[in-house]
Image: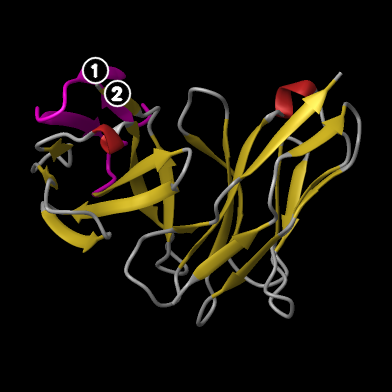
Amino acid sequence: KAGVTQTPRYLIKTRGQQVTLSCSPISGHRSVSWYQQTPGQGLQFLFEYFSETQRNKGNFPGRFSGRQFSNSRSEMNVSTLELGDSALYLCASSLVLQRTGHYEQYFGPGTRLTVT
Amino acid sequence: GNSVTQMEGPVTLSEEAFLTINCTYTATGYPSLFWYVQYPGEGLQLLLKATKADDKGSNKGFEATYRKETTSFHLEKGSVQVSDSAVYFCALSGGSGNTPLVFGKGTRLSVIA
């Protein structure tokens, strides 16, 4: 099976602009989660989508939003970019472990966003 | 809520040294436990997992045992290589909380020849 793909891999934007990142999960995975990774804050959970509905949300401002399509592909949008939004944005698709109902996540390579 | 605590890094070892990265967790019930590895410039890769107490996960020479009595899942490798240099994340799934996985802060490992 193909892994999780994210596009674009690298992006440079200017403060005040908006950006859309894309993620295609592993075939058959219906849950997609997004994370922000920075040197200072580490790995932080943004939100999770399952069957086109946002199921969980982290502690980020409303400038960060997302959606999921019927084919499970997901997009993440950041509006009014700030310098502090420079980060690696990681997408993960989830497999639910049958015995426990717990998640097992598989990550994409990430999108490196630089805001100048 | 759920939480994961990893030993602070960075950890620097010589090639062929023994590696231990400590991980303890707080969770209700019986979570599943994972170790992920992140090589420079890449996303996280699932390294190994354990889904019940006393399970041992293993992969690429790395091992970790799910210890319910000490709420721990320490990562070990008998002989590290330069290619093992990366950041290692301990994580759990299950218990209470509203995120699919809860991650530790990561431990950077540098292996020198």
**Which region is colored magenta?**
A1-30
Position of residue B87 measured from the top left corner of the image (x, y, whole percent): 61, 37
Q: Is residue A65 above or below residue A26?
A: below
Near mark 1 (Cα within 10 A), the count class, few <14, some 14-19 or many ≥20, is: few
Q: How is the image coloured?
A: secondary structure
Q: Is residue B94 left or right of residue A82?
A: right
Which residue in the protein does label 2 denote? A114
Q: Is residue A39 above or below residue A13?
A: below
Q: Is residue A90 above or below residue B35?
A: above
Check disc 2 and give the amino acid type: Thr
Q: Do labels 2 and 1 share a chain?
A: yes
Q: In this view, does B91 lie to the left or right of A109?
A: right
Which secondary structure lies at badge 1? strand
Can you say which quadrant of the picture contains the C terminus of chain A? top left
Position of residue B78 measured from the top left corner of the image (x, y, whole percent): 88, 41
Foreground: B70 or A50?
B70
Foreground: A19 or B63?
A19
Which residue in the protein does label 1 denote? A12
Which secondary structure lies at badge 2? strand
Foreground: A57 or A38?
A38
What residue do we see at 78% from left, 22% from top? B82
Occupied quadrant, residue A67? top left
Q: Does the magenta stretch include residue B38?
A: no
Closer to the N terminus: mark 2 or mark 1?
1
In contact (CB < 8 Å): disc 2 and disc 1: yes
